[in-house]
Image (cartoon, rainbow, N blue to C red):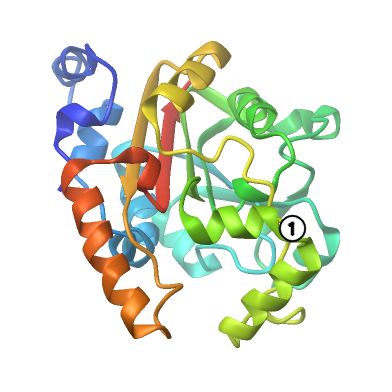
Amino acid sequence: MLAPDTLTRPGAAEATQSQAAAGANAPLGLAAALAALHIENKSDWAWDNYKRVVHDLCIALKAHRILEVGGGRDPLFTPAEIEELGVEMTVNDISPKELAVLPPGYNTACFDIAGDLSGVGHLLNTQDLAFSRMVFEHVADGQRAWANLYEVLAPGGVAMAFIPTFYSVPFVLNWLLPDALAAAIVKRMFAHRTDEDDPVFPARYSWCFATEGTMRPMLSKIGYREIAILPFYGHNYYVRFPLVRDVHKWFSGLAQSSDMRPLASYAYIVARK
């Protein structure tokens, strides 16, 4: 389990205490909100719990307006779940075709999170929580995407991205291979990855790292004031190769126990405006 003091910059605990003193109705500080999730830095945990994590962060941060970046045809929450959460949610995607297959009941916004925001002025400075899953590896300019998220967030708002990371071997290979070949391999390994049901998009891995020394300065320069880099170790890409799978499991356990960030496979990157 990740210790709370690894989650945010020095001074976050004091800020959380001051915020608690301000009253029970105040949203939790980012460190306290993340600590309450009891995060375990294993990749299976990251996948199995992501929906709960976003749900619980909405509650802890007292979010009213939330944005799912790259939600496309498969947003994290159903309309009924959005209503139960008591939030106003907007689903974003760069592709109008992806948004067009959504069932009724969703607010949508078609724009490139790493592009021009002039057409979505109504969203700027409004979102209490903006989140994504397996999206930021596909944007051409990760730094601009994080800068645009900053513009979309309301003061005190939180951005969260669930990403695959360099230098995990499957993702390095995905980056090196031609897009068509990489997509064919993914479709071969995972039957549900079809153009109709779950398309494979080109991956760029711009700013997809689990290392503090890489991500924190970039995010701080944009203006984020609380930053958490939460690594997750291991993956399931070797499940069909027993010997390689077992060696990988052993090595991932070693990397996890020593917190070897460059060897993480996934990360939650969380930052507050």
In x, y percent, where is residue 106? Answer: 66, 61
At 85% across and 34% down in the image, what residue appears?
A: 119
> Does residue 242 appear left or right of residue 6 in this picture?
right
Horizontal and vertical percent position of residue 8 = 28, 25
Residue 266 vertical position relative to residue 153 in the rendered view, above or below:
below
Q: Amino acid at mark 1?
A: Pro
Q: Which residue position is annotated with label 1?
A: 202
Q: Residues within 10 Å of mark 1 (few under 14, many from 20)?
A: some
For this rendering, which residue is in front, 55 or 195?
A: 195
Residue 232 visible in image: yes
Work out whether residue 28 can be spotted.
Answer: no
In this orientation, which residue lies closer to the viewer: 94 or 178? 178
SS at mark 1 in the image: loop
Looking at the image, which is closer to me, 109 or 259?
Answer: 259
76 vs 60, left or right, is right
Picture layout, residue 118 above or below residue 234: above
Q: Nearer the viewer, residue 13 or 242?
A: 242
Name the residue located 72 percent from the left edge and 77 percent from the top edge. 184
State the residue at coordinates (77%, 28%): 121
Q: Quadrant of residue 15?
A: top left
Residue 252 in percent (x, y) is at 27, 58
In the drawing, does residue 232 fall left or right of residue 192?
Answer: left
Question: Residue 209 placed where, x, y %?
Answer: 48, 38
| Figure quadrant of residue 79 | bottom right
Q: Relative to 20, does residue 259 appear above or below in the rendering? A: below
- Give the number of marks: 1
